[in-house]
Image (cartoon, coloured by chain):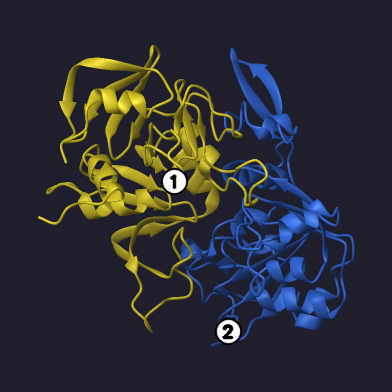
Amino acid sequence: MKKLSPKEIIAKRVAQEFKDNQLVNLGVGIPGLVPNFLPENVEVWLQAENGIIGGGPPAKEGQADPYFVDASKLFCTMLPGGCTFDSTVSFGLIRGGHLDYTVLGALQVDEKGNLANWIVPGGKLAGMGGAMDLVTGAKKVIVATEHTSRDGKSKILKECTFPLTGKEVVDYIVTEKAFIEVTPDGLVLKEIAPGVTVEEIIAITEASLIIDRNIKPMPI
Amino acid sequence: MNKIMTLREAVSQIKSGDTILAGGFYSVGTPDNIVDEIIRQNIKDLTIVSNDGGTPNEGIGKLIYDNRVKKLMVSWCGLTPLVPELVESGQLELELNPQGTLVERIRAGGYGLEGILTLTGLDTMIEEKKIGERVHLNGKDMLYHTPIRGNVTIVEAYAADKNGNLVFRGTQRNFNDVMCFASDLVIASVATPIKELGEIDPDSIMVPGTLVDILVQGEVA
């Protein structure tokens, strides 16, 4: 089997959390790779904020319907059984506790489960879109992120310094090296990737980690 | 009553300084013909409420790039890099709202509700910048937001009859339904030939025609 890239490892591990028929919203970037790794016999419904459940693959060249666009602004298709709706319904699904999982990237995530993923101080201004609603309303919030930033700094901090997307909202942090659960006592290191040691993870993580007594290898 | 007008007549009802609720998500559902005519008629100093900022060549992004907007209320404007520049130089006021909050504020404005209460945005910049106000009710902290209304709503529909009953297609729907409730004047551009009364199945109508004041026949592909 082809060796997985760090992003693929993250996506593959996230995919194992889902159960058949659940409703899931995936952010751009790594979360978008998750459907490639769904276990056999598990199919999930993907929701796009602009009003789709069950959007299919991108439309083939020349076959795009200009009225069907996904949350990444690509012309998309619809899967049989999918549906479309307006934005009040879309966010009723999100805020109303009807969304099983939201999977998002992070700029920073911290010991309390705070997430910062929409703006870098002094950086490019774009807006939060639906991210604040997603982290507030989804039943489970999974942060899918590389363990460290490009310059090698920990993305898992004692305390976020960037403006927050949501306070105390994250349930799980999945990186290419570790699977971490956010608990009232702090971050619990539940799984480590093959070939990585606990010491190594502690060394590259600014946040304090509680090492789970039953720590396991990441099933990837 | 004839609701069908030419594009020119319809847009002449919009005034400089108006607040426009503009439908569309990634410009799907934004009536580009109306946007172009606003620019042609030199209507300016607009407050625009929309999900996103469009792009320099699509949707409300064209109004932003032509300096027609004094205040922009959106959830996201990542494809219009001019926005941060205009904000920095003081030429544009930007109010970012979480997407679900923005659409519900518009719904409140159109449904006769005096505001919304939500957990979204607590302890974030939404609270710091006083977009929403923290209140304590039922033992919980939450944010109160005022309703949003406009002078004019502009939307694109896929189909309509002469009474203004509207049908949207796919992701064209987004904010368009609720925006038709929340302005004093509602203008819909229709992407397919406007139908006679009775030609649309009543169960498939998404916006009751009574809410729509003006219909413009869009360019039919």
Residue at the spot x=59%, y=76% of the render? B197
**Chain letter for the yellow part:** A
Tell me if A25 is positioned left or right of B10 in this view: left
Residue B83's quadrant in the figure?
Answer: bottom right
Q: Quadrant of residue A55?
A: bottom left
Q: Quadrant of the N terminus of chain A?
A: bottom left
The amino acid pointed to by label 2 is Pro
Amino acid type, residue under disc 1 in the picture = Arg
State whether residue B71 appears in this view: no
Whether B171 is drawn above or below A8: the answer is below
B173 w.r.t. B42: above or below: above
- Chain for colour blue: B
Q: Look at the numbered disc 2 and give the secondary structure of its residue.
A: loop
Image position of A21 (left or right of B170)? left
Badge 1 element: loop
* Residue A194 in picture, x, y percent from top left: 16, 36
Residue A218 in sight here: yes
**Residue A113 on image: x %, y %:** 45, 25
Q: Compared with residue A92, is residue B166 higher up or lower down, i.e. above or below?
A: below
According to the picture, the residue beneath numbered tag 1 turns out to be A150
Q: Which mark is residue B193?
A: 2
